[in-house]
Image (cartoon, helix red, strand yellow):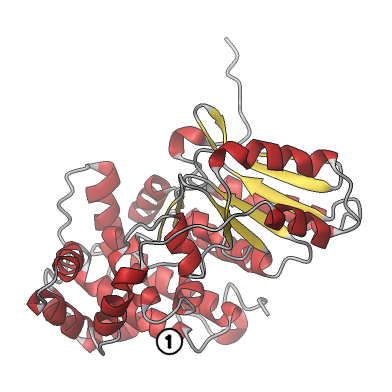
């Protein structure tokens, strides 16, 4: 019996548009190293192909196209590679972050149809898009602190540019937001009902466009307004998440006479205490950085997440608890937010490489 190998990244040029479909639906299109390499190869080819004026990307679910965009990186691979010292772990992050940089700087309109789950690495391949389309099924988050990691793939860069202190809130809590909230946060550009996705997608292949801008404008013309529920919480977000430290943030949240604040505090108490402190520093440093500088910082940070404390990686432990053993009882070290010291946080921001030999030295 012959086993059929199914491509995890489907691509074709129809008309003047390059179409990409993430095709790993059983894993919610979580990115493998092979998928990262396929995306980089395809995008570089199309960037130099005069017959392609724009790119459209979507995910798929078990029923077919759309329904899920991308749940992030393949965290089971990260756990295995981090536990066993697999050198492909280093390759994955270097190549994924280079892909994120390419998308942010892509020479042609890159349009992301962010239907369904859009988390972690899924944000990395959509936040740099010229047009970010969300639907009523969109569930967006950077939930890395739940697995002892930090919002990478340029998360420091794009979260720090959200209005007010929304970036700190999303980065620390990992809370999930819907389409309207994503638009208000500056993490999406417009709303399209999911029952119209297929028609718009197919029209890109059949209509004639003078250039890439016309493709982008056509999709933008189909987008409609969407209400947000975030506005009512914005004052509280800015009040608490502007405080100088994680300890001050959670102390104030726990003392507040507000269901929203108490819920946020309870969420933070479940996250990695060490990584909460690291993430607050990350977002605030990134506010003054360009994308390339931020990605280099995050490349340093992610190496430290796996190798700074041999045998004591918060990330390996967090993934174990969430996705491997599934006991949902990570043994964080330190165990409490109040036990983290500046001396524990500082090494995450020291590069293990000289500037000239940094894995992302070539990013401009």
Please determine whether, in this image, residue 24 is positioned above or below residue 350: above
- Residue 263, quarter of picture: bottom left
Camera-side residue of 12 and 231: 231
Q: Tell whether 221 sits left or right of 115.
A: right
- Near-viewer residue (113 or 286): 113
Apparent side of residue 175 relative to residue 127 in the rendered image (left or right): left
Query: Is residue 308 in view?
Result: no
Q: Position of residue 47 (x, y in %)?
A: 81, 59
Residue that appears at 45% across and 44% down: 137
Q: Residue furthest top?
A: 1
Would you say 180 lies left or right of 20 here? left
Using the image, determine if residue 227 lies above or below residue 235.
above
Q: Secondary structure at mark 1?
A: helix
Q: Position of residue 299 (x, y in %)?
A: 49, 72
Name the residue at 51% across, 62% down: 93
Question: Total label count?
Answer: 1
Q: Position of residue 363 (x, y in %)?
A: 66, 76
Dot 1 corresponds to which residue? 285
On the rendered image, what quadrant is the N terminus found in? top right
Residue at x-position 68% and y-position 44%: 20
Compared to 227, does 283 lie above or below? Answer: below
Q: Position of residue 145 (x, y in %)?
A: 30, 64
Whether residue 82 is visible: yes
**Which corner quadrant holds the C terminus?**
bottom right
User: What residue is rendered at 15% in x and 59% in y?
Assistant: 331
Residue 239 falls in which quadrant of the image? bottom left
Neighbours of disc 1 within 10 Å: few (<14), some (14-19), many (20+): some
Observer-nearest residue: 351 or 112?
112
């Amino acid at each position: 019996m012959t086993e059929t190998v199914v491509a995890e990244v489907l691509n074709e040029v129809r008309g003047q548009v390059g179409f990409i479909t993430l095709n790993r639906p059983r894993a919610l299109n979580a990115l493998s190293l092979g998928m990262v390499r396929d995306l980089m190869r395809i995008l570089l080819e199309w960037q130099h192909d005069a017959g392609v004026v724009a790119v459209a990307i979507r995910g798929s679910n078990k029923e077919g196209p759309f329904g899920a965009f991308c749940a992030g990186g393949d965290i089971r691979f990260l756990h295995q590679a981090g536990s066993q010292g697999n050198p492909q772990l280093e390759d994955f992050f270097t190549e994924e972050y280079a892909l994120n940089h390419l998308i942010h700087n892509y020479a042609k309109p890159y349009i992301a149809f962010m239907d369904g789950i859009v988390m972690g690495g899924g944000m990395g391949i959509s936040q740099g898009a010229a047009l970010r389309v969300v639907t009523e099924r969109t569930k967006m988050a950077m939930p890395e602190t739940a697995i002892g990691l930090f919002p990478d793939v340029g998360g420091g860069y794009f979260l720090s540019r959200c209005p007010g202190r929304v970036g700190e809130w999303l980065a620390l809590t990992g809370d999930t937001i819907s389409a309207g909230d994503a638009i208000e946060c500056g993490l999406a550009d417009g709303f399209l009902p999911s029952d119209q996705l297929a028609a718009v997608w197919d029209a890109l292949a059949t209509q004639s466009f003078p250039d890439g801008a016309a493709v982008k404008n056509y999709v933008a013309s189909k987008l409609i307004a969407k209400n947000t529920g975030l506005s009512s919480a914005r004052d509280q977000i800015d009040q608490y998440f502007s405080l100088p430290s994680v300890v001050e943030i959670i102390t104030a949240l726990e003392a507040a006479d507000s269901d929203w604040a108490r819920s946020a505090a309870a969420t933070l108490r479940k996250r990695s205490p060490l990584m909460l402190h690291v993430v607050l520093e990350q977002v605030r440093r990134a506010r003054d950085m360009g994308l390339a500088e931020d990605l280099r910082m995050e490349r340093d940070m992610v190496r430290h997440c796996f190798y700074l404390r041999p045998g004591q990686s918060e990330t390996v432990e967090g993934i174990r608890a969430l996705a491997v053993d599934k006991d949902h009882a990570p043994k964080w070290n330190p165990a409490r937010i109040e036990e983290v010291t500046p001396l524990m946080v500082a090494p995450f921001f020291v590069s293990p490489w000289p500037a000239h030999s940094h894995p992302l030295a070539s990013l401009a």
